[in-house]
Amino acid sequence: MANEIEREIAQMADALETKRGRFPRRVGEIPGCFPYSNFKGLLLAFETKELLLQRFAYELLNFAFDTLATPSERFRMYVYGSSWIFIPLISLVLGYFASWWFILINLLILVFMSRAKKLYNRVIYRGAFDSELVFCFLYCTGQVCVTTADFEKTYYWSHENKRSVEEVIGMQEEEKPKTRRRSTKKEGKEPPPIGADEIPDSEVNKAASEAAKILSVQVVLDELHKYEVESTSELDQEGRVQFMAKLRELLNDDGATDEETFLNADTGLAFSELDKAMSGQHGIAFTVIKPQIEQLLRHSKETLAPTMRKTGISHEVIVLAAAKLILDDVLPSGNYHIYRGVLSQKGHFLFDLYNFAVRKLWAEGPDQEVSADAEINSMEEAISKVG
C-alpha cells in the first residue's frame, strides 16, 4: 500500500513539475536553509518537539487527499462535502411542511466543515510523517511547513526555491534570457588588473558550490545578484575576480582559511564522508552534531585532516575522530539527559555513535594507551554522574 501511494505521489510530482518546476524527492534536496538534510533526523526533531509540522496553505488538494486517505476516510469526506447541498435542501423542505425553525439545521454545515478540515489535516500529517517522498511533495505544494518550537522561524516552500542549488550557481546550464551585466568599469578609469590567467567557469562554479555548503545558498545568491546576473556563467572576467574575492572574504569571516578553492582536498573529502554518514547507520547522531563537526574540520584544516592522512587513515575515520572529540564534551554535559544518569533518545543515538567511533579508531590504531573498552566505560561512568 505504501509503495502504491508513493508511486502515485511521484506521478503527481512529475505532472506538476512541468508547471511549477523541479520537485525535490528527498529532504536533502530541498534548497535553501532547511534545518535537516535527512528524513530520520527531521522525524526525530518532530518527536522531541524541537520542530513542529504545521499546515501552511488554506488550499485543499483533493487529489493528494484521495491518494493518502483510506476508503473510509474518503467516504467521510464525501459525506461532509455533500452537507453543503443536502442540509439546505432538507431544512427548506422541513421548514415549508413543518416549521421554519428547521432552518437552524443549516448550522450543522459549520460542524461538518470543521470535521472535514480536521480529517483533511489528519490525513496530510499522517502522510508527511510516513514517507519522505510524501513529505517533500506536501512541503513543495505548500500544504505543510516546518516551524521551530519557539515559533521564531518558519521554513516553507517559496517561489525562490524552485531552482536547485546547482542551477542557481550555474552548474547546470539552461537556456534563459540574458540579464544585463553590471559594468565594473568606471568612466575615465582603467579597471584593476586581472592578471594574465583568466578564471574559468568551472573554477568559479566549484568555489560557489563549496561556499554555499559553508555559508548557505542564500548568502552566495545575494552576493551574485549584486552583479545583476542569475548564474556565475554570466559574470564577465572582472566580475569573476571580484566575486571570488568577496566569497573568500566571507569565508574568512566565517572561520575558514583562504585557499585556492576554499577547502583543501583533505577537508573537502572529509565533508563528503560526513554527507555520506548522514544517511548511514548513525545518521541521526551525525545530524545532531553536524555543525560542530564542520566547524572543527574547518578550523583544524591545516592540522587534523592532512596530519591524519599522512598516517594512512581514511577520511571516514577523520570524520569519526572529529565526532569523538565533540562527543567527549557533549555526552557528559547533561544536555542530552532525561534525568541524572539517564540519556534521552538523542543521547542514546549519540552514545551509540561514540561507541562505534571509539572502537573504529582503536581498530585503526591498536597501539593506543587506553583500550576501547576502558574509554567507553569511562564515558559511561561520566554519563552516570550528570543529568
Image (cartoon, helix red, strand yellow):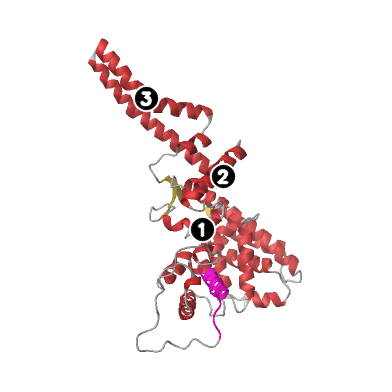
Q: Which of marks 3 and 2 is in front?
A: 2
SS for callout 3 = helix
Q: Residue at x 59, y 41 (%)?
A: 7
Q: Count the labels in the image.
A: 3
**255 to the left or right of 222:** right
Residue corresponding to mark 2: 10
Q: Choose the circle earlier in sequence order: 1 or 3.
A: 3
Give the residue type at disc 2: Ala
Location of the N terminus (image quadrant): top right
Q: Which segment did they paint magenta?
A: 197-211
Measured along the vertical axis of the image, is residue 280 above or below residue 308? Answer: above
SS for callout 1 = loop
What's the CA distance linking mark 3 and mark 2?
Answer: 32 Å
Q: Does the image show residue 200? A: yes
What secondary structure characterizes most of the magenta part? helix
Q: Which residue is drawn at 56% across and 47% down?
A: 133
Spot occupied by residue 203 in the image (x, y as percentages of width and height): 56, 75
Instruction: Answer with the quarter of the image where residue 301 lies.
Output: bottom right
**Residue 122 colored magenta?**
no
Spot occupied by residue 208 in the image (x, y as percentages of width and height): 52, 71
SS for callout 2 = helix
* Image marks 3 and 2: residues in contact by CB distance under 8 Å: no
Residue corresponding to mark 1: 335
Give the residue type at disc 1: Asn
Q: Front-most of 285 and 190?
A: 190
Measured along the vertical axis of the image, is residue 93 above or below residue 361? Answer: above
**Residue 204 colored magenta?**
yes
**Neighbour class for label 2 at 10 Å: few (<14), some, many (≥20)?**
some
* Image marks 2 and 1: residues in contact by CB distance under 8 Å: no
Residue corresponding to mark 3: 83
**Neighbour class for label 1 at 10 Å: few (<14), some, many (≥20)?**
some
Residue 180 numbered tag:
none
